[in-house]
Image (tube, helix red, strand yellow):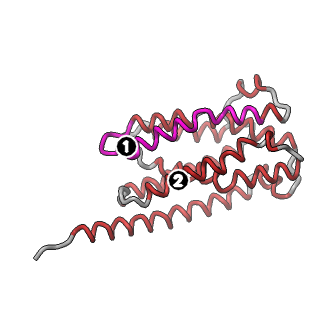
Amino acid sequence: MTIDTTTDAAADAAATAGDLAERLADVWIELEERLDAVPVLRRLAEGTVTLHDYQRLLFNLRQQVVDGSPWISRAASNFDIEHFTLRAAAIKHAEEEHRDYLMLERDYVAVGGSLEELRAGRKNLGSEALSGYMFTYADRPNPVGLLGAMFIIEGLGAKRAAGWAARFQETLGLADSQVHFMRYHEVADGNHTGDLEAILTSGIVDAAAADEIVRCAQVVARLYALQLEELDR
């Protein structure tokens, strides 16, 4: 009698992917609840946000955004040949994002900010913690857990950035050219989340990797919210 292990393996992979999706959805719900309490985002929702608030948000985001492509590149260099799919995806992603900070800088200048002051700025407390965590994790051999970080960061771009941009425009009367960074990421990060979903459901993520992905998503969700809470500190 021959036992068909192929079917069993496929079923196990499907179950792992389904469980992972549910766990990440729970992390996302917690993040949404925390973001609703962030002062600048609460003022945005209430319609009391100011131009200075928008400038501060861009100023603080820029200091972390410039680190995005470098930590992705570092992660790519630490995937071995057995994780070629993830290495290739990371290299492609880093290449696509390494100029993103320039869009943010243009938006900042377009709303009256000083480029010199922006580039001389430093990370706030939350951004320091977030970037430090990302680079440290990226230094691990085969840092598969960073897929959880991408779930959070790309998810925010795809699901929240355009809404934030529209609300800033509605409240402050801003032009499209002054919110280009946020609007761009609705489309770009939407494509990235599609690529991520394909990886997470491909069967290459086992139970141990799923645990790492969820844990990384939890940490990054908390630290990303923290950088929004700690503007200018």
Quadrant assignment for the C terminus: top right
Q: Which residue is mark 2?
A: 217
**Majority secondary structure of magenta residues:** helix
Tell me, yes or no, if residue 218 can be seen here: no
Residue found at x 61% / y 47%: 188
Residue 179 tag number:
none
Q: Amino acid at mark 1?
A: Asn
Q: Along the line of sight, which residue is nearer the eye, 231 or 93? A: 93
Say which element carries label 2.
helix
Q: Is residue 86 magenta?
A: yes
Which comes sooner in the sequence, label 2 or label 1?
Answer: 1
Q: Which residue is mark 1?
A: 142
Q: Is residue 186 above or below residue 77?
A: below
Residue 195 locus on image (x, y percent) = 50, 52
Residue 194 locus on image (x, y percent) = 53, 55
Tell me, yes or no, if residue 123 can be seen here: yes
